[in-house]
Amino acid sequence: MARLRIGSRGSQLALWQANHIAGLLRQRGHEVEIQIIKTTGDKITEVALSQVGTKGMFTKEIEEALAEGKVDLAVHSLKDLPTELPAGFRLAAIPRRENPQDALLSVKFERLADLPQGARVGTSSLRRQAQLKGVRPDLEVLSLRGNVDTRLRKLQAGDFDAIVLAAAGLNRLDRTEMVRELIPIGTMCPAAGQGALGIEARAGDAATLEALRFLDDADARAATLCERALLNALGGGCQVPIGAHAERAGKQLQLTAVVARPDGSKLLRESRLGDDPENLGIEVGRTLLERGADQILKEVYGAAAVVPQQP
């Protein structure tokens, strides 16, 4: 069996993900090693990444190592991977997806609805901020960066009344002790690809592509292809207030999408059934643009105000 080198970011969650894939490959008889690569997004710690405007800030350096043959595959959080891969790369596998929902964590309060007027909520994304403010405009939404342990420590220290994190990462790291509520999709639509991993490889590396084929999950690929098609149709990246969630509904896919102003003053929602994942994403994206999403996104891209930061 081939020896495979995995490129990964060095965060606790990224290494869990890389080790998870490494374990599955080892079960198939492969010798596997993990190489940690620091990305642009890891180096920017003081500036809101939603204002940097760089696509691929969590993937660029890993793709460079892949192109140079220093690693054979990369394990990404799919939501960090740009919707259009550079020439020469292929999304080799999308494994079975974890829960894509966002989770509310708190020491004192059980639900989003239970938070007192003016409660301090920490979040790392414009998407979460916009939807929080949409249902609870009274909340004080504050910037929260750092790894999962750092964020939980800040919550325990009383810096926040609640924080919002992806349920998938908490489940993977077995850090669900302060999860109080899985926020319904209708209240907080997740990021495109949230909860899914994207395994990237060189397009011409037939041996590695074949070795990774068993990892691919048909339902996860269909749902995330749909979500990423919507994101691409809107011209958005992971730092903009766009939510997308697709799931099986019988033989079809149900896509729910949201585009929102960061202050929550305008939320455009669209939900539709379809047979073709990519076409469904494109159609819903175009409908949202026709309904005014283009103006919202122009405002976001041109905004200079300080906003919560991406992880």
Image (spheres, rainbow, N blue to C red):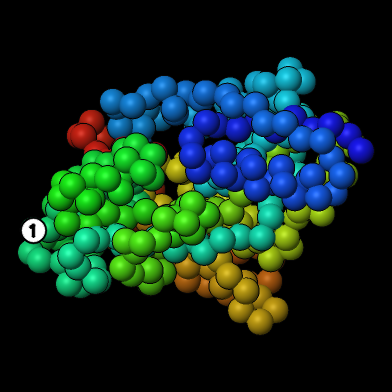
Q: How many marks?
A: 1
| Disc 1: CA contacts within 10 A as few (<14), some (14-19) or many (>=20) | few
Query: Which residue is outermost to the bottom?
Result: 250
Residue at x-position 50% and y-position 43%: 13
Residue at x-position 49% and y-position 29%: 57
User: Where residue 145 appears, x then y in whole percent?
Assistant: 31, 38
Q: Is residue 141 left or right of residue 260?
A: left
Residue at x-position 64% and y-position 55%: 225
Mark 1 highlights which residue?
118
Looking at this view, is 284 or 161 the one in front?
Answer: 161
User: Where residue 68 appears, x then y in whole percent?
Assistant: 74, 17
Residue 109 placement: quadrant? bottom left
Residue at x-position 71% and y-position 42%: 22
User: Where residue 261 appears, x then y in whole percent?
Assistant: 27, 51
User: Where residue 142 appears, x then y in whole percent?
Assistant: 19, 45
Looking at this view, is 298 or 277 the one in front?
Answer: 277
